[in-house]
Image (spheres, grey):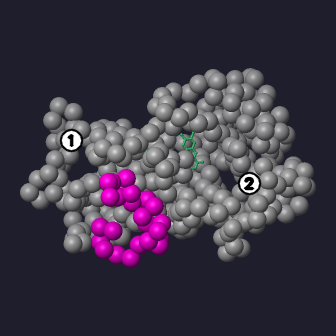
Amino acid sequence: VPLQPAEAVVVGAGLAGAAAAASLARRGWRVRVLDGAAAPAAGASALPAGLMAPHYSADDNLLSRLARQGIGITLGQASSLLPEGADWAPCGVLQRRSRLVRTAMGPEDGTRPATPAQLAAAGLPPDAPALWHDRAAWIRPGALVHAWLRQPGVSFQGASAVERIARTAGGWSLTGPGGRALGEAALVVVAAAFGSRAWLEDGVDLRPVRGQVAYGRLAGLAPLAPFPINGQGHLLPRVPLDGEPCWLTGSTYGHDDADAAPRAADRQANLERLAELLPAAAAAVAPQFQAGQARDWSGVRCVSRDRRPIVGELQPGLWITAAMGSRGLSFAALCAEVLAARIHGDALPLDAELAAAIDLARFRPA
Ligand SMILES: Cc1cc2nc3c(=O)[nH]c(=O)nc-3n(C[C@H](O)[C@H](O)[C@H](O)COP(=O)(O)OP(=O)(O)OC[C@H]3O[C@@H](n4cnc5c(N)ncnc54)[C@H](O)[C@@H]3O)c2cc1C
């Protein structure tokens, strides 16, 4: 039976939680978003800037189709909520590949072989295998989180780590350390990334994947590339960070590593990865690494066993949206819309196969 909009609480103020809050608020819920940190976007969503780009696979697999669907929703949200150029830009991306197989996507997806002019503009040889994706953007995740939290009906409450979620007559009550009461709500959505484990049943694993990016000032450098490039790693050639134009490159992958502290070895790994992806850009920024001017940001991704996000009802009125992996920008808004549509019994924004592919139920015994 679909719930009637009332008070809801979302646990976790990253991309997943903020998106869920906004989707519920659009349907009339009054949503309080709690986070253990003092300010929103304190976890992986504190990433200074990220890339949202289609996931190309020769057979157009589930992840590719999910990402495509999600990108459409995030592009719509970003264009209505964020100032272009400051917090995001729908700039397209050039994707380097080891070889070019026939693309399974049609032109309507905005994906096609890169043109000689695009390759030349990126400083790549004319025979370099590469795709061009129109439907790609860089986005500052924290800006999107803040924008979602500013939507009418949404409020944020920091310094409110949730330890316990217990059933009450009318829904759920939440408590923090020392039994501090954090409120009651008819509907609770757990969007706490790795911190969601406490409320998951056996058989649904969440794993940490640590990652680090490097970034630095563009001042004094020749332009690195006219658009973002990805492949094994990525380069955002121009994003405003810390109040000035910067380049940003990444990312490292530390599987089963939940340590969010920056590491010198990862900084070096980021420079080496860039040297493979775009040698001229790596040569241009290398002096900043040598002079100790390259800055680091590191965080911890949360992934499920099959790398797809998890959306579902843990118990009646207690929902989860988590495991955004390396693609929170592609998946958070999609998962939020699926979650809200399922709660309301509305039509889903994706087909039944894709809905099943992110459903919590896939991990439950048949
Ligand atoms: C190095 C790196 C590079 C990346 N690059 C990209 C990229 O280019 N493009 C892209 O799309 N994605 C990228 N990602 C992934 C992206 O950052 C994540 O997918 C996304 O931020 C996850 O959002 P989330 O809301 O699920 O988790 P988080 O942002 O981690 O939010 C979870 C929140 O829950 C809170 N919390 C946890 N437990 C509790 C509790 N018990 N009570 C209250 N609050 C709690 C935490 O404080 C945190 O704020 C990258 C990640 C890393 C690490």
Q: Residue sitting at 31 percent across and 74 percent down?
A: 345
The answer to whether residue 237 is left or right of residue 4 is: right
Residue 289 lies in magenta, yes or no? no
- Residue 184: percent from the left, percent from the top? 17, 52
Residue 113 is drawn in which quadrant?
Answer: bottom right
Is residue 12 at all visible to an observer of this figure?
no
Q: Residue sitting at 51 percent across and 27 percent down?
A: 261
**Spatial separation of the CA atoms under disc 1 and disc 2:** 44 Å
Image: 212 above or below 346: above
The answer to whether residue 329 is left or right of residue 134 is: left
Q: Residue sitting at 69 percent across and 68 percent down?
A: 104
Asked if labels 2 and 1 touch by Cβ distance under 8 angstroms, the answer is no
Q: Residues within 10 Å of mark 2 (few under 14, many from 20)?
A: many
- Residue 361: percent from the left, percent from the top? 35, 58
Image: 54 above or below 160: below
Residue range highlighted in magenta:
342-366
Residue under pointer 2:
95
> The residue tagged with tag 1: helix, strand or loop?
strand
Q: Residue furthest front?
A: 366
What amino acid type should be assigned to the residue bearing mark 1?
Arg
Is residue 55 at all visible to an observer of this figure?
yes
Residue under pointer 1:
164
The answer to whether residue 360 is left or right of residue 353 is: left
The quadrant of the rendering that contains the N terminus is: bottom left
Residue 268 is drawn in which quadrant?
Answer: top right
